[in-house]
Amino acid sequence: MSTTKIQEGDTLPGREFKADTVQLFLYNAAIWNPHRIHYDLPYTREQEGHPGLLIDGPLQGDWLTQIIEEWLGDRGVLTAFRYSNRQAAYIGEVLAGEGHVTDRDGDSVTLSLALRNQEGATTTVATASVRVDPGH
């Protein structure tokens, strides 16, 4: 966590995510998502035509909020978050998360974030707003 004031152009620390089948199963159980593309490989390949189990969109959105929360620490609070999945992501892929500050207006800070797979394709994008405490 930086002691300098947050400003437009600042980069959030990147992070890599790689889901395994256990994490994917537990996450989907916790959110009551029974879609078989997240746990049944034969079904996913034969019925849905995917090459592997899909990492679900909400998990990717949650990963992006983790980047925000880790960067923000105790300097403020996440007030708004919106994400959009752009491309399927599969078990075994390493997704790199990145973000930066796009605007600062008083205590309101706007962020832009993305997850990219190993080929550099964007799987998920997000925007977020945070409110920072005075002095940050």
Image (cartoon, helix red, strand yellow):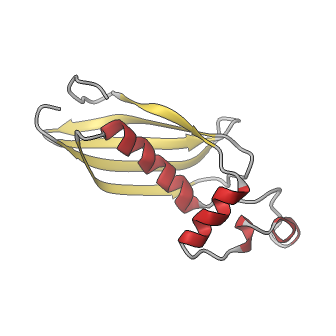
Picture coordinates of residue 124 (x, y %)? Answer: 55, 50
Q: Measuring 71% from the left and 44% from the top, which residue is drawn there?
A: 93
- Is 133 situated left or right of 15 in this image? left
Q: As displayed, is residue 129 above or below residue 100? A: below
Q: Nearer the viewer, residue 55 or 32?
A: 32
Q: As displayed, is residue 135 above or below residue 121? A: above
- Is 70 situated left or right of 60 in this image? left
Q: Measuring 87% from the left and 68% from the top, which residue is drawn there?
A: 42
Quadrant that contains the N terminus: top left
Quadrant that contains the C terminus: top left
Q: Nearer the viewer, residue 6 or 9?
A: 6
| The image quarter in which residue 133 lies | top left
Picture coordinates of residue 50 (x, y %)? Answer: 80, 61
Q: Nearer the viewer, residue 29 or 65?
A: 29
Q: Nearer the viewer, residue 76 or 23?
A: 23
Mark yes or no: residue 128 visible. yes
Mark yes or no: residue 55 visible. no
Q: As displayed, is residue 78 above or below residue 71? A: below
Q: Measuring 21% from the left and 37% from the top, which residue is drawn there?
A: 104
Picture coordinates of residue 52 (x, y %)? Answer: 80, 57
- Is 105 situated left or right of 22 in this image? left
| The image quarter in which residue 68 lies | top left
